[in-house]
Image (cartoon, rainbow, N blue to C red):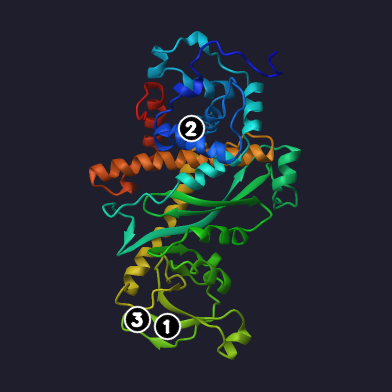
Amino acid sequence: MPRAGWRKPESEQRLSDHISIGVLTRTYPPAMVDAAVASAGRQERRHRLLPARVVVYYVMAMALFSHAAYEEVMRSLVEGLAWSRRWRSTTWTVPTKAAIFQARVRLGVEPLRILFHRAVHPLGTPESRGVWFRSWRLMSVDGTILDVADTPANEAAFGRPPHSRGEGSAFPQVRLAALAESGTHAIVDVALGPCTVGELSLAPELFRSLQPGMLCLADRLYFSYHLWQQASANGADLLWRARSNAVLPVVEELADGSYLSHLFATPKDRAVDRDGIPVRVIEYVLEAAGQPTPELPYRLITTILDPTLAPADELAVTYAERWELETAFDELKTHQRGPRLVLRSKRPEGVEQEIYGHLLTHFAIRALMHEAALEAEEDPDRLSFIRSLRVVRRAQTSGLFSP
């Protein structure tokens, strides 16, 4: 006797055997998705209308078609593809919104989290343009917030930031800290938390992805002895902006105008010269256009102590690459998700699942853009993310980029 919830298949062929969504299945092949599902212990023990592999692709498709209703996202996922000519349309019908919701609950967030950490990586190769500063791969760390559906469960899990008038803001918010490859905008690691947790508390989770040969850029918010110590622990080099009130005494002036100094955890440690971390300081001024007086000077600190390896003027120019992560956030939040749209999931685990779906989709688009840039011998910055997003959406219905 069939168990409750079991559905007899009308065909020996399963939806998961045929599903293709262009660049997503090309970047995340079915075997890779199945392995992530198995590692999370979410593989099926019986035939379902919506197998776990399909639901993983569906969550990514939600990010690709963020304006569409649940059923329309599923229809976009399976209709109009090359395989549909070889597979009778009567073998499958679009599931209801309730069925899709239950399938997402069964899947949970863990398979997508595992898939993200296994599949996402820096994209740059030695031939890539705009990815390198001399021999260093440029990386950036920064944070942002995401509005989520206004439900009691989401508010309890993520919090609601205060309004300037003392009221709560319109939506609960998730805080996201991210590490990205600056030149390709590939977001390679993230840490999530409620909006009540600052990004500095989340940042140490990202430092696990820093490696020797990387040069990590960060703004002055991150400037602290302990974060500097944690970020450099794995051998990556750092180039961060220092706060204007930071005490950085001159130890030795260098030929390129920079100087050597030390970071100390406390003023007392500085007074007794205890446990200081050697750093190199680069000071310069950016003149504001149309202003009678220049802005306050910038101060950068770096772990690269030898000026012949990285001259001060080149590091000052390179620091501007930190803004590429802001552009990646704009791609993710404004263009891919859509302006003024909130994440649609009404429960915290669904919110996290949806966020990883957005991150996986963004990486897939950026991987495609990097391949195109390599072929054209161009900097990936020269390619339009909006156009690429439109191409990927159109390609879904034509079966292009299928594995």
Coordinates of residue 194 in the picture (x, y in percent): 67, 50
Is residue 100 at all visible to an observer of this figure? yes
Q: CA distance from mark 2 to mark 1?
A: 48 Å
The residue positioned 36% from the left and 64% from the top of the image is 318
Residue that numbered label 2 is attached to: 64
Coordinates of residue 222 in the picture (x, y in percent): 54, 66
Asked whether disc 1 touches disc 3, contact meaning CB atoms under 8 Å apart, the reply is no
Coordinates of residue 188 in the picture (x, y in percent): 47, 50
Dot placed on the residue nearer the N-terminal end, 2 or 1: 2
Q: Is residue 285 above or below residue 336?
A: below
Amino acid, disc 3: Gly
Q: Residue furthest bottom?
A: 272
Q: Nearer the viewer, residue 141 or 114?
A: 114
Residue that numbered label 1 is attached to: 260
Q: Secondary structure at mark 1?
A: strand
Mark 3 nearby-residue class (10 Å; few <14, some 14–19, many ≥20): some
The residue positioned 46% from the left and 18% from the top of the image is 79
- Location of the C terminus by quadrant is top left
Residue that numbered label 3 is attached to: 257
Determine which quarter of the picture holds residue 230.
bottom right
